[in-house]
Image (cartoon, helix red, strand yellow):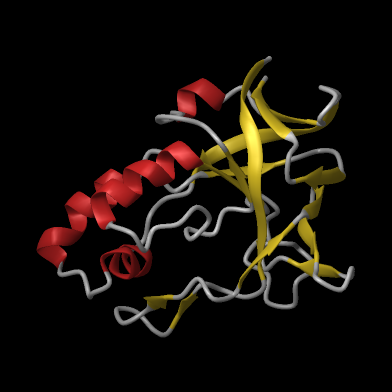
C-alpha cells in the first residue's frame, strides 16, 4: 500500500446540493455537514451529528430522497491537491469539501483515476486497515457546480472548458465498499 495522506475532512449531504429545474438548476453547498466520524457501509454513509445521533447522507440507500438507488455511488472521495487546483482557477470560494465529497484526504498535486483504480484503503492511526473502497468512476462535473464556483451563470461557450478542467477526478471519485466500518478525521488513506 502507498499512503496518500491524512483524512482532514468528513462530511455528509443532508439533501441534494442541486435544486431547481434544468437549465436553471443551481448549486448550494449549504446542506453539507462536516462531522468527525462516519459509518461507511455498502448502502452509503451515515455521519455522527453534533448531538451524537447518526445523520443519513442523501446518497445512502435508506435516505428518503436517495440519490443512490442502484448502490453504485454511495461514497465519494476527494483530495486537497485537487481543491488547490480548483481554487487557482475559480478563486477563494473554493474550500475543501465544497464539491460534496464525503471523505477528503490531504495530498499535493493531482491523483488520477489510473493511480487509484485498484482501490483505496482507510487506515487507522496505528496503520491497521479499517475499510477498503472500490473506486468506480470519476465524479463528473455539472453546470450548476461550475456556475457556483464562478459565482455567476455559465454561458455555453465558456462551459465546455470549465467542465473539461473539472472532469477526470478533479471533483473526486465515486466509490463503494463491500464491508462496513467507522472512519474518523485523522485516519489515513492509502492506495491498495
Q: Nearer the viewer, residue 68 or 1?
A: 1
13 lies left or right of 147: right
Residue 4 place in picture, x, y as percent? 59, 25
Residue 100 place in picture, x, y as percent? 54, 59
Q: Residue at x 60, y 35 (%)?
A: 135
Placement of 30 over or under 12, stated as above or below: below
Q: Residue at x 82, y 49 (%)?
A: 41
Placement of 28 over or under 89, stated as above or below: below
Placement of 163 over or under 34, stated as above or below: above
Residue 74 makes an appearance in the image: yes
Q: Which residue lies furthest to the left in this view?
A: 157
Residue 192 place in picture, x, y as percent? 67, 19
60 lies left or right of 81: right
Point out the image quarter for the N terminus: top right
Q: Which of 170 and 186 is in front in this view?
A: 186
Q: Residue at x 86, y 24 (%)?
A: 128
Q: In which quarter of the image is residue 34?
A: bottom right
53 lies left or right of 26: right
Q: Residue furthest bottom?
A: 20
Q: Which residue is drawn at 66% across and 25% down?
A: 190
Amino acid at each position: 500500500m502507498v499512503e496518500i495522506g491524512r483524512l482532514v475532512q468528513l462530511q455528509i449531504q443532508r439533501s441534494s446540493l442541486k435544486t431547481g429545474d434544468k437549465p436553471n438548476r443551481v448549486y448550494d453547498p449549504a446542506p453539507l455537514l462536516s462531522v468527525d466520524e462516519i459509518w461507511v457501509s455498502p448502502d452509503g454513509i451515515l455521519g455522527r451529528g453534533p448531538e451524537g445521533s447518526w445523520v443519513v447522507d442523501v446518497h445512502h440507500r435508506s435516505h428518503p430522497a436517495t440519490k443512490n438507488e442502484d448502490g453504485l455511488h454511495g461514497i465519494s472521495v476527494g483530495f486537497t491537491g485537487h481543491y488547490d487546483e480548483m481554487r487557482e482557477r475559480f478563486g477563494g470560494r473554493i474550500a475543501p469539501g465544497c464539491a460534496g465529497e464525503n471523505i477528503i484526504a490531504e495530498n499535493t498535486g493531482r491523483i488520477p483515476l489510473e493511480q487509484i483504480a485498484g482501490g483505496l484503503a482507510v487506515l487507522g492511526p496505528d496503520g491497521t486497515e479499517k475499510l477498503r473502497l472500490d473506486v468506480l468512476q470519476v465524479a463528473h462535473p455539472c453546470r450548476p457546480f461550475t456556475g457556483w464556483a464562478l459565482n455567476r451563470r455559465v454561458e455555453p461557450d465558456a462551459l465546455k472548458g470549465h467542465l473539461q478542467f473539472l472532469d477526470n477526478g478533479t471533483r473526486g471519485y465515486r466509490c463503494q465498499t463491500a464491508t462496513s466500518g467507522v472512519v474518523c478525521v485523522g485516519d489515513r488513506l492509502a492506495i491498495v
